[in-house]
Amino acid sequence: MIVASVILSLAADARASMNDLSIVVGNKNYSSWSLRAWLALKQTGAPFKEIVIPLDRSDTKEKLRAHSPSERVPVLKHGGEIIWESLAIAEYLAELFPAAKLWPSQASARAIARAVSSEIHAGFVALRTHMPMDVRGRYPGKGRGHGVDKDIDRVAGLWRECRNRFGSGGDYLFGPFTIADAMYAPVVSRFITYDVALDDIGAAYRDAVWRWPAMQEWAKSASDEPWVIAQAVI
Ligand SMILES: N[C@@H](CCC(=O)N[C@@H](CS)C(=O)NCC(=O)O)C(=O)O
């Protein structure tokens, strides 16, 4: 009885504050980590407020400090709670909104979705360094620094494996859109910006993510932004 009433009151707390979500992001053209968390939040269908902090400006650090304990974006605010780190935000949203099915429901698919999400979160340094996200930019053939081809091959291999093993229920890595797709969305944008050639499975997946309405909404905002950051490698 006590357990049931605690569960009911926790559920009521969560429901009561579902409308109290905001996300702090960087420039949409450049902030790849912000894109990941923002896409996961969009996928919940919940209303949220958005605060954009332009990066690489004299007042950026001060603005970041006002919102983020790590002085980085994204940050999710839910009531009095502050969550930073894109993957932690995505995990939090998956728990808060179980109906959104942000992770695959089958255990081994879910474990692999978490593995590929952690792999991009922690790795692919050459790709992330030499091909910085620039959503509206088009630089075919650029960004091929040391180690980038190896990273591209690994990404293409992961996409192929996930699509072949788990993708039959939809156009995304695990069928329907999950956090894993949000984590690779900036890579999709990079592959378009730098015109990276892909096999048929990779190209179809890239196009599916790019067409996704939330991705298009982000890309439109990125194109409309006034800020320009010089990218060293381009
Ligand atoms: N590991 C963090 C990385 C966050 C990160 O590096 N964010 C960049 C923007 S994409 C940032 O806030 N940079 C601060 C700055 O440019 O001053 C995450 O996953 O959220």
Image (tube, rainbow, N blue to C red):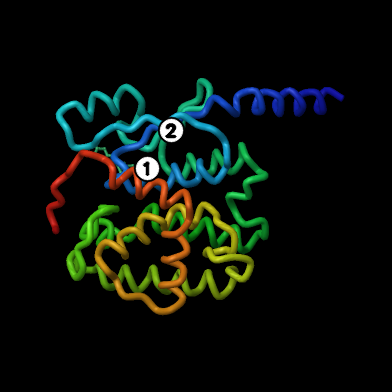
- Residue beneath disc 2: 23
Q: Position of residue 177 (x, y in %)?
A: 55, 56
* On screen, residue 119 above or below 39: below
Is the residue marked 1 within 8 Å of ligand 1, measured from its CB? yes
Q: Residue at x 49, y 56 (%)?
A: 180
Kindly state the secondary structure of the residue where label 2 is placed: strand
Q: Residue at x 51, y 29 (%)?
A: 21
Q: Residue at x 37, y 71 (%)?
A: 154
Asked if the residue at tag 1 contacts the one at tag 2, i.e. Cβ–Cβ closer than 8 Å, the answer is: yes
The quarter in which the N terminus is drawn is top right
* Quadrant of the rendered image containing residue 187: bottom left
Q: Amino acid at mark 2?
A: Ile
Quadrant observed for ligand 1 in the rendered image: top left
- Categorize mark 2 by other alpha carbons within 10 Å: few (<14), some (14-19), many (20+): many
Q: Residue at x 37, y 42 (%)?
A: 34
Q: Is residue 222 left or right of residue 95?
A: left
Kindly state the secondary structure of the residue where label 1 is placed: helix
